[in-house]
Image (tube, rainbow, N blue to C red):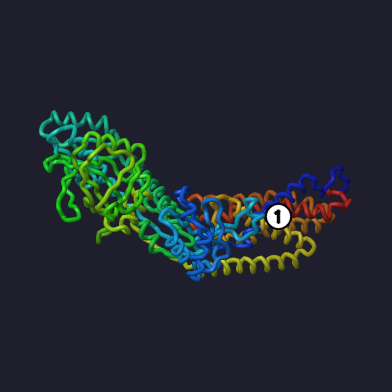
Amino acid sequence: MKKTPSSAPINRTAPWKYVILIITLMIMSLSALPSLYGEHAALHINHRNVDSINTVIDATEVAKQLHSADIQTLSVSQIDSNIVVVLADVTQQAAAKTVVEGALGSDSTVALAMDPAAPQWLTSMGFMPIKLGLDLRGGVQFLLDVDMEPVYKAHRQMIIDEVGQEVRGSRGRQVDQQVQITFRDSEGLQKAEAFVKDRFADWQMSKNGNTLVLNQHSDELEALRSSTVQQNLQIMRSRIEHLGITEASVQRQGQNRIRIELPGVQDPAAAKHVIGATASLSFHGLVDTRSAVSQTIADDNGVPVSIDRRAILGGEHIIDARASLDEMGMAEVNLSLDSVGGRKMSQFSRANIGKPMATVYNEYIQGQDGASFQESKVISVATIQAQLGSRFRITGTGNLAEAQELALLLSAGSLTAPVTIVEERTIGPSLGAENVKNGFAALALGLAFTLSFIALWYRRLGWVANTALCFNLVMLLGLVALIPGAVLTMPGIAGLVLTVGMAVDTNVLIFERVKDKMKQGYSFAQSINTGFDSAFSSILDANLTTMIVAIALYSIGNGPIQGFALTLGLGLLTSMFTGIYLSRAIINLVWGRDKRRMVKI
């Protein structure tokens, strides 16, 4: 064996790579910095009617009302039509919201929020603190079950009504999951077959004498289930916005369930009441009780009213609802419809001037057996005096408080299927703060032991690994803060602790290769060059297999599992970046002047 000089320089890093490293570390450090300052509990106040803003909203009056209620504030500022109240104590947030809502007009919206405590120069650059999850901030979590049976039943009833309108004299009924429609003769049966094939192609048909048996395809049932749950998701998000809650998480879980997390909510009873409510309105014409599409529903006095089962329009067309008092001091709800609903109401009212129209209040109630059933009542029957448009009002809604509650549910959307709260979990703000303290204490302890071990075991290379490890943690926190929608949870902190250990693995693999090369007679510079190159493939393979697991966990998991998978996956990326490239750049900068380039071959 002999030694020959190598013409290629080793342990050299191009200047442009140092520039990229420095810029990357600066950006990640700035992104992580606001998280050190934390957040303050706040109220965001805005007004719907800008024309009357000066008479309704005033920052000085808000501060005065809060001070009289002995609620401490850090600042009360007004920007255009918005007021931001920063509170000194997070436990007073719910009380402050009640005080402000009582002092301001009904047109004002008061939202619970958390504002960054970082300096303005930092937030003006777009850097914000890491969003904390329910287990770290406190709040309430609901798990809702969407009951699909009423939706399936409504679709089965719809096809019975449609066929009944097309073929007179038919009698339909629902038997389990089937629709059975009996006809007087074979001619009616043939006509119904052609009608169903044309209008309801997603239904399977079979015959039993003069009875047509219909079953909906399983693919269509699954599509209906997915569509219904998705619509309920959107409606839940709208309801939460009307509740004035920011940074809420609404996600689908499994086939029929919805998980809602409301960080910072201190009044779970109010949130539970609105989220779980299934109230809606529908408008019907009155028909004779002998009609095939008639349905009898009692009004508030128990008097039966015969209405058309087919609604003129339902609550899905209501885009805004406001409660108020009429000239006689009676509660009423003023409704605004979308373009489709306005057109339907206009067409119906124009053709039925002088005829009565019933407003029906529908609500799903859960029975003792756990099944949901619909309870309806007629809240008003009014004669159509003139053609109605997209704006009109309804009465018979009870007192003003009941009208306001109904208006909230209608403006936030009526659920397409009833939901049941099957699980409720509440975490207080003090417990959330304790989780943050304990989680980061565990992270600090693990980091301290790791830094001490690396420094003692690898000596002069140890401080390089420790520097890279510290920057790895900073970069990881910066990435979590930068990614939209990323939320740090308690399992996420566990992922941070795990990332510290995995980041050390990268340096351990490299430094052990360096030690092996030095034992073989290589110079320090040669050992560094060969050690980094030979360890790269092993590091890549190990991190790639773990990344696949992290991606799988994030894809099929939910909530806390996703929080863990997120920090684990991002930690793999940052550990490779700092362990390989940053460590190599530091070592090259310090020991890159070694002129011994003899390579053993």
Amino acid at the residue labelled 1: Gly
* Left or right: residue 548 compared with residue 252: right
* Left or right: residue 505 compared with residue 212: right
Q: Is residue 586 above or below residue 390?
A: below
**101 and 250: which one is in front?**
101
Q: In this view, does 226 lie above or below 400?
A: above
**60 and 489: which one is in front?**
60
How many numbered dots are placed on residues in this image? 1
Q: Callout 1 environment at 10 Å: few (<14), some (14 to 19), or many (20+)?
A: many
Q: Quadrant of residue 218?
A: top left
**564 and 502: which one is in front?**
564
Q: Position of residue 46 (x, y in %)?
A: 48, 53
Q: Is residue 484 above or below residue 421?
A: above
Q: Where is residue 94 in the image (x, y as percent from the top left)?
A: 46, 65
Q: Where is residue 114 in the image (x, y as percent from the top left)?
A: 54, 59
Q: In this view, does 597 lie above or below 129?
A: above
Q: Where is residue 372 in the image (x, y as percent from the top left)?
A: 27, 55
Residue at (53%, 63%) from the top-left corner? 41
The answer to whether any part of residue 446 appears in the image is: yes
Residue at (40%, 63%) from the top-left corner? 424
- Per the image, label 1 sits on a secondary structure element best described as helix
The answer to whether any part of residue 549 appears in the image is: no
* Left or right: residue 9 compared with residue 566: right
* Left or right: residue 132 compared with residue 126: left
Q: In which quarter of the image is residue 342?
A: top left
Q: Name the residue under label 1.
A: 579
